[in-house]
Amino acid sequence: MQKAFATFLEEQATLDLKVLQRHWQAAPRRHGALPLYEDAVLGRTGRAAANTALVRPLSGGRYEIALSGATFNDWVDIEAAGRDISTLPPDCAHALLDAIEEAMRARHPIHMRAFSVRNGVVKPYDLVVFPLANRWGGLLLLAYVRAREEQFGMVDAIFASTTGGLLALSPTKNQDGLTDDFRVIAVNQGGADLVLREIAELQWQLLSDLFPQLRGTGALDKLVAVHNSGQAAEFDFVYPGETGVRHFSMRAAAMNGLVSASLFDITEIRNREESFKLLFQDSPLPMVVYDPQTLGMRDVNLAAIAHYGYDRERFLNLMLHDLLPEDDRSSVRTVFASGPLEAGTDEVWRQIKADGSLIEARVFSRQVDFHGLPARLAVIVDVTEQRKIEARVSFMAHHDALTGLPNRVLFLDELRRALSRVHRQGQPAAILCIDLDCFKDVNDTFGHPVGDVLLQQVSDRLRAALRDNDLVARLGGDEFSVIQRDLADAGEAGQLAERLIDVLSKPYDLKGQQVVIGASVGIALAPTDGESADDLLKNADMALYRAKDEGRGVFRYFQSEMDARMKARRQLEMELRAALIMGEFELYYQPFVSTETNAVTGFEALLRWKHPQRGMVSPLEFIPLAEEIGLITPIGEWVLRKACAEAATWPIHMRVAVNLSAVQFRGHKLTPVVASALASAGLRPDRLELEITESVLLRDSQANITTLHQLRELGVRISMDDFGTGYSSLSYLRSFPFDKIKIDQSFVRDMAANSGDAAIVRAVTGLGASLGISTTAEGVETLAQLEQLRAEGCTEVQGYFLGRPMPSSDIPALLAARTD
Ligand SMILES: Nc1nc2c(ncn2[C@@H]2O[C@H](COP(=O)(O)O[C@H]3[C@@H](O)[C@H](n4cnc5c(=O)[nH]c(N)nc54)O[C@@H]3COP(=O)(O)O)[C@@H](O)[C@H]2O)c(=O)[nH]1
């Protein structure tokens, strides 16, 4: 019945509003202006008059209520006529002003929903504002309000909408008349959801019946205390429910004999806190929580205590920057306080431990909530060891392990830096390349460990001889290089070179061995001798090459013509490599003849290079280069195989002599190669004579003598070439039992004129005879020389007089001619 009446009223009101709207629309308008108040409203509002108010604009954006009906006054809860709208209750004033301004802008009636709140009850209204013209000019506005049926209490709204639990609890007494439990009077949906029940299941029930374990949590006692004391309280409790342990937070207040309580599930927060605690305290990584404002420590984990060595109490009294050395504190304070390290940092901080030792650490920090306050959690990764290793690796990458000097990589970096300084400041610099003379001999004679000591002593001397501004590096082997910065003139580089040669030429004490070596130096000047670091180094190296070439123990400045020579050498090197592949080598054969029978006893194989453009190239030109670049090994093997193969076609008593370079003795491959050459050719080993020079006995002498013995075991003959030209030829005869001594052609050439040479020839032949070693004299160019050698008892002779080196094709003719 009541509902039907309400609907009736609603319909009436709607009708009234429609009437007003129709009048406003139907009213005449002049020139599109708004309808006049007199035409649209005056005497036409009828029943709606109670719901309306006539509003008049004042100056300064203010509005006054000129007339107001009873329903309108109810809405604003005041007699509105004659009032400035701004003095009405704010809920109505705001709604009215919004609608008025909108209607004036739109020049059209505006319909809005407005609310009034009285005594916690919210009432919705329809508010319609009609803009009108005033007959005297200006505007008028008609405001119409109509209450809507629905209305609701504010408390109900909050009660229904909050997801937290809200409860109204009525205390119950026990037999002793004391409050010890509560009955649920009201509970919202949020509360029911929290405890996983329906509202109907909870209402009017005792808490202890609903939640039997609640008493054990202490929560019931606290509610009783709130009721008894009238004091509100806030507390947390843990409830061991059917679905697992849950954490709740409760706020309770006593109210008119009831207790109202709000309940929140804080299980997730507590779990998060627990896992944070677990991750924090049990983490093997040192961690601290600090206040981003004061940098004071809030918490430290066990790993941090162990790592820094402070006890917990002392640690917690520290500020974050107390962990840093004095010098770093001010800058770090800003960095850590502003907290730019959200995702971690590449920066490494120095830190001090309780015992004063310094560590290096990376600090990763992020914002955390610590017991409800903003804080930063810093994870500390100690990188001290890693940094030491990195530093060591970097040092090793840039320094020579034996001497500790910068290596080639660092040297070139420094050279580039020096060069840009030269370009910037215009003051020249010099690069000095130093090579030790006779270092190889020391190594070969005394072994590598002694060679290493020598290199260390050389490094020390070089370091000591230089200014702080200069730099010395070991580029490899016995090669050192110096950067001499800020030269006053080019002469300074020469003076330094002289000083270095002098310093390095002084005797060394190597594990009790007194050794003297020398040094050669090549100098290139920046910027004149090269644009780049590589060019300068290359040119200094070229100058060094020249210094070594010109007698060692000297220094040479780079000159541009050296470059041309070096280029020519490089060209030769390239062509030499190609020659072997292209088959441009040939063997010529020079006979040696018995002084006793005048018969040819064999031939010496002599290498020739038939260059497609340059013609025949002398071995004197290319063999040293082939030795230097290691190409002599394959070339020598080719000579051996070819000579053996051709000798196998000669009369059976004839031998072939093959020259061996000392380089061919390296690598222990010589004996198998000789054996293979003999086997492939089918040549009897005693028909092969291997000629060696003293260089074979100088370098790696012991290993080479072993190889000579192995060759001898094959049945091959070994002869000593160029005898008498070396420093200790006689001593070589002691080190290996040679089959033949070849007297150097320099003695033969001047034998007639120089009695000294004749005496040497006589001594060598006599020595050979007494040791049972045959002697061959080289370079016999005249009959007189031949006769003299025969008279001295020389066994064999060789030279242009007896036959020049010839292609193998000429051998049959030569042999035929000599037997005729
Ligand atoms: N490791 C190798 N060394 C080799 C090989 N082939 C040659 N050589 C060495 O090259 C040097 C120069 O040799 P070459 O130009 O062939 O000169 C030899 C003869 O032509 C020359 N000779 C011979 N008789 C005379 C003479 O009466 N007068 C004169 N002015 N020169 C003469 O002497 C060179 C032979 O010398 P040697 O070896 O000491 O017997 C030279 O050192 C060769 O050894 C090779 O395959 N491997």
Image (cartoon, rainbow, N blue to C red):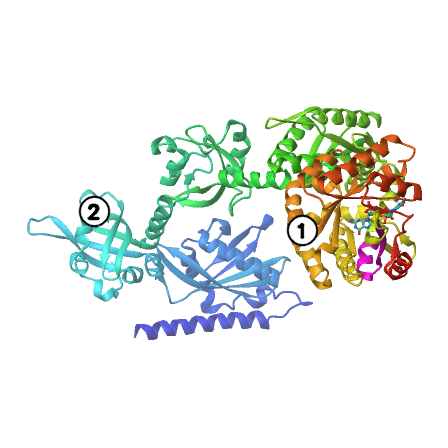
Upstream in sequence: badge 2 or badge 1: 2
| Res. 248 in view | yes
Locate residue 20 relative to residue 29 in the image: left or right: left
Residue 222's disc number: 2
Left or right of 423: which side holds 283?
left
- Side of 577 where 248 appears, left or right: left
Q: Nearer the viewer, residue 270 or 645?
A: 645
On the image, the x and y values in percent for residue 722 come to 80, 41
The answer for how far apart the CA atoms under marks 2 and 1 are is 108 Å
Residue 585 inside the magenta-drawn segment: yes
> Is 745 inside the magenta-drawn segment?
no
Q: How far across and how far down the image is residue 396, in percent? A: 60, 40
User: In the image, is 354 to the left or to the right of 786?
Assistant: left
Question: Could one spot residue 466 in this view of the protein?
Answer: no
Out of 89 and 695, give the one closest to the viewer: 695
Q: Which residues are magenta?
A: 575-593
Amino acid under label 1? Leu
Numbered disc 1: secondary structure: helix
Q: Secondary structure at mark 2?
A: helix
How dense is the environment of label 2, judged by Cα within 10 Å: few (below 14), some, or many (20 and up)? some
Q: Amino acid at mark 2?
A: Lys
Tag of residue 711: 1
- Residue 477 in the image: x percent, y percent? 68, 39
